[in-house]
Amino acid sequence: GGINLEDIKAPECFEIEAQLREALNIPIMHDDQHGTAIISGAALLNALILVKKEISKIKMVVNGAGASAMSCSKLFIALGVKKENLLMLDSKGTLRTSRTDLDKYKQFFANDTKIETLEEAMANADVFIGLSKGNILSQEMIKSMGSDPIVFAMANPDPEITYELAIAARPDIIFATGRSDYPNQVNNVLGFPFIFRGALDVRATTINEEMKLAAVHAIASLAHEAVPESVLSAYSETNVSFGRTYIIPKPIDPRLIEIVSPAVAKAAMDSGVAKHPILDWEKYALDLRSRMGLDNRFIRRIMSKARQQPMRVVFAEADNVKILKAAQIVKEDKVAIPILLGNIEKIKKLLEENKIELNDVTIIDPLQEDKMREEFGKSYFEKRQRKGTNYYESVKLMRDRNYYGNMMVEHGYADAFISGLTKNYPKTLKPSLSIIGIANNITKVAGMYIIMTKKGPYFFADTTVNIDPTSSELVEITRMTHEAVKQFNVQPNIALLSYSNFGSSKGEVPEKMANAVAYLHKNHPEITVDGDIQANFAINKEMLAENFPFSSLVNKDVNTFIFPNLASGNIAYKFAQSFGAAESMGPILLGFKKSIHILQLGSSVREIVNMVSVAVVDAQTKSKV
């Protein structure tokens, strides 16, 4: 266990914490002190990087001499601030050696100085740390500071100066508060839960200086990483990256537990205060994700498989920021080797504007590739010359990135193709059908969605292509889905859905589903499948066993669902996405000779990354055929 102290003023909080540390062999933390210190320390390090100032040379003013101010100042000194360069003020002015009213805690910060007031202290200061009261800092004081001033106005509920006044006074300022309605929120929630998590997980006997410093550096480093789509959406932002208005991660960033807790745990081990060392750091990281509800073993398994043999994935819509962010992630995670299609200058400008790092990535503008367009056009003409296409039109089509990208896969310049973020599904699908074509012994392609739930993944087909498949087409869709599910190391147990249960109602839909099942039972006994069946009976093992004990799905966890038509499949997966499903992947195209996958219009960055992982695994499988 551990103890967190709350709402205890100085100097009592110092005495209580010291006595508890002496008496107990468990982590003790006063969040108001140490939490504020750790978060502001991380923000300070990043702010100094931006203004190119050395921490050992800065002049710092700390307004406030309570528990938070003292704890922050001690940590700043541990980070490299010179004690003689730090001026602390209480309600009576600067803490200076000539004062006789200072207790032992304040005496530690007393300097031999003639400066008495806040106004005097602010002249040429590099950093202001406010932990006092609202509206005591004037624009004139900020104007008197040195170049690129750093101001952390952390008084609550009102900061020492408002954001608007501070920015108006000094456009070159880096400004932070404790409030969520301004940029750079310095909030204890960024650190406290994750610091304690790391300490408890190694059974630390204390929270020492090394652990606090490790948390500082971990939080600071996270601000340099690309911001997750979920965080951007929560704050209604489209582009957030390390800079003057983003020096500290957002409090809801889901990666904090994965970054801060391991750093604290490792520091506890390295400093000799851990009674239960962590031996498997990868497993520990997965455990942390599980605790926060971030774990999805199925997606991790797909990504892990993709990393075993990263494939070349061509992105047809590389002039889109979401695509570029996804490409950065899959490249950094070694999931795929991105190839970007589009206007080279436009793509480079987007990369620069959004601070997306895609070094050494191949960028191709089909409009500048005359020779390749000619080669691809000739190939396309040979494929389509008896289907109403002439040579001139074939070459001209290669100006379209969807045609060009498919041709890259067809001719071995890439292994997989991703498109569809900004265009409708049928229009994006057409080039793939005419260039790549369907696999041998297949007459139709189909679309499958994977819906991740707490019970595991569910597979839905066909959700995107065939409007009203016949019985024989349903057999084909079932076979393709069966193979696709096995590709993800999952044993498919398949239900062909209807409004009927094994002939309980008559009609075209139950009849074609029953006919498809009969054919599969006779010709493909290796497939675990049954139907026609209603969805609730397929999912509920007890109901199925009680009412239909003869079914081949009895005592099976049904995880794969074949729908009678496009309307029912499409509606079902969209309902599942909306009501409680953790995440979805798709649509995954089934039946192509090569790895071709079309995104849902408006997919998020995370959804694109998931689809790229699927595309890579699909390409791995098809490269072995």
Image (spheres, helix red, strand yellow):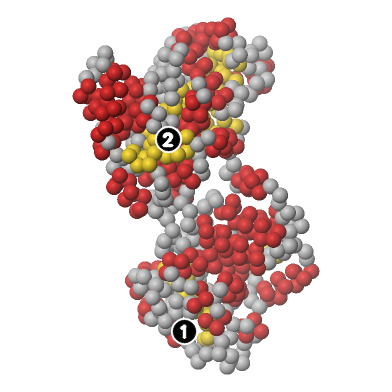
Which residue is under mark 1? 121
Q: Element at badge 1?
A: helix
Which residue is drawn at the image coordinates 56% and 18% (left, top)? 495
Question: Relative to 531, is 589 on the left or the right?
Answer: left
Residue in the foreground of this view, choosing between 408 and 387: 408
Q: CA distance from mark 2 to mark 1?
A: 58 Å
In the picture, residue 190 is in which quadrant?
Answer: bottom right
Q: Residue at the location (68% across, 66% down)?
A: 208
Q: Residues within 10 Å of mark 1 (few under 14, many from 20)?
A: many
Q: Residue at x 62, y 83 (%)?
A: 108
Residue drawn at 66 percent across, 78 percent down: 11
> Where is mark 2, residue-wise?
313
Is 383 or 198 nearer to us in this picture? 383
Q: Is residue 5 visible?
A: no
In the depicted structure, whether residue 346 falls above or below residue 92? above
- The amino acid pointed to by label 2 is Val
The answer to whether residue 582 is above or below residue 59 is above
